[in-house]
Image (tube, helix red, strand yellow):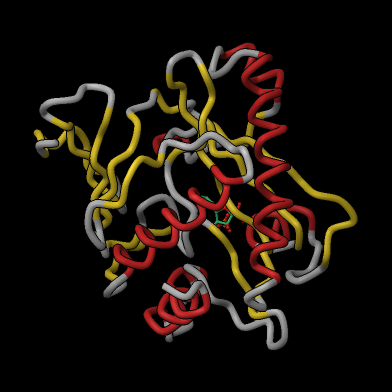
Amino acid sequence: MVKGEQMYEGKAKKVFAVADDPTLCIVDYKDDATAFNGLKKGTIVGKGVVNNRMSNMMFQLLEKKGIPTHFVQELSERETLVKKVQIVPLEVIVRNIAAGSLSKKLGIPEGTPLKSTVLEFCYKNDELGDPMVNEYHILAAGYASKEEVDTITDMALRINELMIQFFKTINIDLVDFKLEFGRCDGKIILADEISPDTCRLWDSRTHEKLDKDRFRRDMGGVEDAYKEVFARLGL
Ligand code: UDP
């Protein structure tokens, strides 16, 4: 396995080709952090390691429970071998407790438990600011097929159940999170990452924020929050 050329550099990760296997890629997690569609930039020292190792742990846990993912093998503390996928251009957001944009939009105070799970789709497009779309928009614009939307919906809700259960064991409330899916051999599989960058994680007892909101909202203690999640995961 030979690390090939850089294919892409995103806000938090670089993606490299694998010179001797076109079906694989290597993801390299950075410490760079952005928020508000790239308007706020900074560094969270050690974040790349936490996000890589946490994501890999979550993906392996989900695989064991029957969720297909892009995970292949952890290569180093910041690098992971993954299956190459074509990303479905949707951010899939799952919410259990009101926070962030949902609280703002609907006026439901942050921390209010939702009476039922909320699933949202946003079209992945920085120039447009990742607009929220519904199934009609997705089908009309051709972002995904009806069958794919159904599969993604079922997988996202199942992942939510599994993650809520898991985080409960380490005294963390899973407030909300974002997933991305990819197409691989005609199948939908979970891709991207699951980390404190993409989840809202609150201490179950104190409700302390253990995620990227500390960076977004200039709350301080950002590195410590990532380290705390890492420690609770036993990593
Ligand atoms: N999220 C993400 N990437 C995005 C937008 C949202 O990972 O580009 C995650 C975010 O960390 C949170 C959830 O999705 O866990 C819901 O985010 P929300 O819509 O409330 O947006 P925000 O308030 O973060 O702008």
- Residue 168 location, x and y as percent? 70, 70
- Residue 221 location, x and y as percent? 43, 86
Relative vertical location of residue 18 with respect to residue 44 in this rendering, above or below: above
Q: Residue at x 76, y 62 (%)?
A: 97
Which quadrant of the rendered structure holds the C terminus? bottom left
Q: Residue at x 42, y 50 (%)?
A: 37
Residue lying farthest to the right in this orientation: 115
Q: Examine the image and state in which quarter residue 224 appears.
A: bottom left
Looking at the image, residue 129 sits to the left or right of residue 19; the answer is: right
Count numbered badges in the picture.
0
Residue nearer the viewer, 1 or 186: 1
Q: Residue at x 55, y 52 (%)?
A: 61
- Residue 93 location, x and y as percent? 63, 45
Q: Examine the image and state in which quarter residue 185 appears.
A: top left
Q: Residue at x 33, y 62 (%)?
A: 33
Which quadrant of the rendered structure holds the N terminus? top left
Looking at the image, residue 129 sits to the left or right of residue 111; the answer is: left
Looking at the image, residue 17 sits to the left or right of residue 49; the answer is: left
- Residue 123 location, x and y as percent? 53, 31
Relative vertical location of residue 47 with respect to residue 205 in this rendering, above or below: above
Q: Quadrant of ligand 1?
A: bottom right
